[in-house]
Amino acid sequence: MSETILSMRVVHPLDDAAEEKLFRPEMGRLELPRGARMLLLLLRLYLAAMLMLIGAHFLLSF
Amino acid sequence: MSFATFSQGTLAVRPAWRTRLMRYLVVAGPGLIVMVADNDAGAVSTYTQAGAQYGTHLLWVLLPLLPVTYFVQEMVARLGIATGQGHAAMIYQRFGTWWGRFSLFDLMLLNFLTLVTEFAAIALVAGRLGVPPALAIPFAALGLVFLVGTGSYRRWERMTLALCGLNLGWFALAWMVGPNWGQALRDAVIPAGPTGGITGGWVFLVIAIVGTTIAPWQLFFQQSCVADKRLRFADLGAARLDTLFGAVAVVVFAAAMMLIGAGLFRAGIHYDDPAQMAVALGPVIGRVGSMGILLLMANAALLGATAISLSSAWAWGEMMGWRNTLQARMTEAPGFYAIYAVTVGAAAALVLIPGAKLQAIIIGVQVISGIMLPSAIVFLQILLNDRAMLGERFANRRWNNWVNWTVIAVLVALSMLLAAKVLLPGLFTGA
């Protein structure tokens, strides 16, 4: 059984006690599902393609 | 008045409206600042140009941008509150060194180039006001460093919000131009192409409006700002409201700028840059109005410059593990403030170099922004689907994901079109 107590006094976040967040540094790297890994691969291909486009643009402009 | 109810031993107290308002007021800031700062010098140029070329016909483009900006920025606010970390820190820690460094390099490069355009705008305005740019630019750079270097987040936020408030002047100027309100309202809600048919130039302007409204630095800025302000889990509702008000602000200010540009469209006046536009509008809005446009342009450039430089300094500090908070004095966080000052100083110096290729830099900003935005949003989407860390409260819901994937798909397509248009101008035909 939980009890909820909401204070009527508003405290600025910078004056409030720090709360424990959901991320901790020891969590390390994200374990990516296959879909996310594929997405990152696609992202690399997209970035490589855009880099080649820029390279071609500069080569053609000289 | 507050309400208290008892149910099976649970006490639930609903705060009175004054308490809710106070809670909103102490939480508000990051969302409003990031959105209003997004209407920077480049945005002023794009929106007024859209009005000057097509009157009020492109107002409808702004309406769908309201939910798009809200959904994207709400995600970073939520992630910042849940993790207490900035966006760069999350990419570095959760995706590894390669993606972390890549994101930081992209962000720093793009931010620096954008910063140069902000100072170029300040130089233009100073020139029109009769102030030598060699005096105005260093003065502006020093002012920007002073703005962040007070050692108090709250002081910075108040000063920046005051600068945001000056944007209300765009409404007064739009009113002075005397738009056809009925036509403007119709064009704002009913999508329509230009009267002369759709051309390459029209498509480019539509893409530029979208690209101007959502930029990669905004993701990094708002998440770092939320983390620096130490927003708590209970602040999520108020932070969402802050982001929503910011999204409304960015769109209505953009509409006001477009209405001002439309004044030139009706008068059949052409111009080369927004500073020249302010002077050209003189016969319509008077000398005070022209001066107002110039000052608001300078304000837009300063707001953009402080937000962009801060997003760079926060991101760099997160990656290096430095102390990176506006709560620290300059001597307590030297690396953080040094990155801010160096980026501001270098961009200011570049603008002062005679013959610097500013037009090439402006085009470079559009290209890199177009390339980087999809990758920044993809990371955000993956991070917000990490249910193991975020739990049901903070992770994306299914409908969230559908909306966001749609936004990402549209942005990727538009960004690629924009990049292609800039890199290969012959791809599109028509004026």
Image: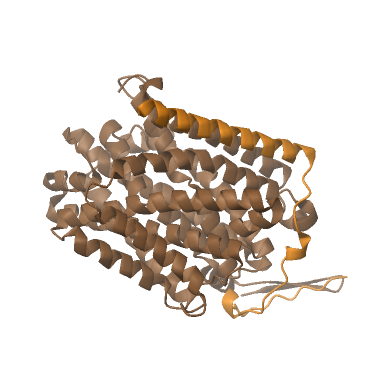
Chain colours: A orange, B brown
Where residue B263 sits in the image (x, y, percent)? 22, 40
Please state which of residues B130 and B391 is positioned toward the viewer in this rendering: B130
Please state which of residues A61 and B402 is positioned toward the viewer in this rendering: A61
In this view, A55 is above or below B158: above
B157 vs B137, left or right, is right
In this view, B243 is above or below B184: below
Q: Quadrant of residue B80?
A: bottom right
Residue at screen point 30% across, 23% down:
B431
| Camera sees residue B169 | no
B307 vs B402, left or right, is left
| Camera sees residue B390 | yes
Residue at screen point 34% across, 52% down:
B116
Where residue B258 sits in the image (x, y, percent)? 32, 42
In this view, B248 is above or below B26: above
Residue at screen point 51% across, 38% down:
B371
Q: Across the whole image, how many numbered discs are drawn on residues?
A: 0
Residue at screen point 52% across, 34% down:
A51
In this view, B300 is above or below B234: above
The quadrant of the image that shows the N terminus of chain B is bottom right
Please state which of residues A54 and B159 is positioned toward the viewer in this rendering: A54
Q: In which quarter of the image is residue B46?
A: top left
Where residue B99 sits in the image (x, y, percent)? 63, 48
Where residue B75 sits in the image (x, y, percent)? 62, 52
